[in-house]
Image: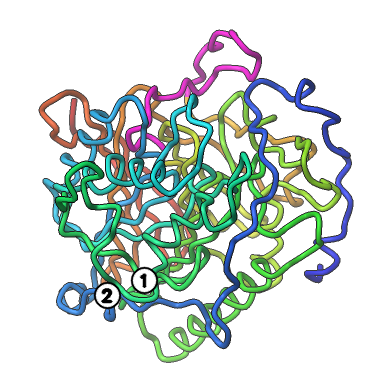
Amino acid sequence: MSNETAAKEPAENPGVANEADLPHCVEDNGFAKIPVDPPKKSSLVLDFADVDPDEEKKIDHTLVFHTLGCSGDAAHLQCGHMVAESMAKQEASFLYHLGDVVYKPDATKSDLPADQHNLYFHQFYTQFASYKENIFAIAGNHDGKAAKHGETDAQSRIGHFLANFCAPKRGVPDDAKDPEGGKLVSSRLTMNQPYPYWRLKTPVANVVGLYANVVNGGQFDNPKKGSTRQYQWLTDTLTHLHEKRQEQKKKCEPLHAIILAVHYPPYSGATNFTQRGDPTLSVHDNTAACRPIATWLEEAFAETKCYPDLILSAHAHLYQRITFTCADGREIPCIIAGSGGHSPVEALFKPCAEGSKPGPAKPTPFPVVLPGKYQFPKGCSAQVEAYDETHFGFMEVTVDLHHQQVRGTFFAVLNDDKQPHAKDAFALDISTHKVTTVKVEGP
């Protein structure tokens, strides 16, 4: 299916008439404009060697990095601090944040720079002061909302994300300075990612980061305008990575891992994902072109013949490990690592209705919940292999070229000792595209 065809195909659900008709768990957000265009003549690639050359030299054939999302919290900062301090006890090359770096208090209506400065100071720079490695990020919906109440685009939240993670060059961030005394709380520099969607290149893996904007369930391009700019960049990027893999195969070289990161999860076992994963539930935008994130990804994979080895997401404040199985038998582990600190940890089986109580737990594995009118491509399926709806925590991801594996371990932070406790682990064979569960020992 061509990009333009994909963008113009109408959805069965025409949208919701007004806010009162929205299901309780659905987010009332329209598509938010990125205030700057992508740099011209840029493939939107950042080489890790240009960020941290000393650490890049240590990677050799094995890369270890951390990942999590939804770490900010305007009211309960101690949970995110606990996770960050737990991660700091381990060695890793960097942290890849999956979005929702900061959250605005519900009672605060303004998105003025002073308000955003306070959020980043407390929920990012102070919170991660103990974590000394570089932090890369994709924007979540709470990082990307447009300015409201008469403020300008320059004062929107996505603009503040750009200032901290997509700076033209690295430097001392204003948001790391105490708003009251001006003292720096962290030695962390701004990051120089090329754009909110971009590719991180390392010696053993490429991480393709997507920006799913703020529409309920996620959307890559503006449905109101029928744009396909980010989708086109994704297919161009996957085509390039597929060609590189073909070259590696011909030369009998180890295959570099392909990891895809997107804030909104394409698959979930959550009871409320029927609503929370459906982008046609919107009152602001023309929803004719809105389709679930999973559909856009699956079509990009099929079009380019390039499938990621691992998909990382967040948004839901809990941990899930899902296996997506393609029609050809290929397996892709899909992680939801949204328990990075935002309180409370979500209940997986709670329905969308306001005041509802969680339903009975299901033994794993069990099929994922389908959003809206979504249906799997013929022969494909997905099931939940493991989940943790009790603890905050983070993922450790290892790319091992010697063994041609991508391994992942979810570490829970059980109490105030700030020690990481392994709760779930898996291994993917890059050559055979098969996933195995790895036994973990811990409390």
Q: Is residue 331 one of those drawn in magenta?
A: no
Left or right of 141 on screen, residue 168: left
Check disc 1 and give the amino acid type.
Asn
Picture quarter with the C terminus: top left
Left or right of 155 on screen, residue 280: right
Q: Residue at x 43, y 85 (%)?
A: 248
> Which of the two labelled residues, at mark 1 and mark 2, occupies the earlier sequence position?
2
Q: Residue at x 66, y 29 (%)?
A: 26
Question: Dot 1, how many residues are within 10 Å of its Cα: few (below 14), some (14-19), or many (20+)?
Answer: many
Left or right of 432 on screen, residue 427: left
Find disc 2 in the rendering and name its residue: 51
- The secondary structure type at the circle numbered 2 is helix
Closer-to-camera residue (195/430): 195
Residue 3 x/y as whole percent: 78, 69
Find disc 1 in the rendering and name its residue: 192
Q: Are marks 1 and 2 in contact (CB under 8 Å)?
A: yes
- The secondary structure type at the circle numbered 1 is loop
**Residue range highlighted in magenta:** 338-363
Left or right of 276 on screen, residue 433: left
Closer-to-camera residue (345/299): 345
Picture quarter with the N terminus: bottom right
Check disc 2 and give the amino acid type.
Val
Closer-to-camera residue (300/178): 178
Q: Is residue 350 one of those drawn in magenta?
A: yes
* Residue 352 against residue 294 in the figure, above or below: above
Can you tell which mark lies on residue 5? Answer: none
Residue 264 occupies quadrant: top right
Residue 198 x/y as whole percent: 49, 69
Q: Which secondary structure is most common in the magenta stretch?
A: loop
Residue 442 x/y as whole percent: 18, 30
Q: Residue at x 48, y 47 (%)?
A: 143
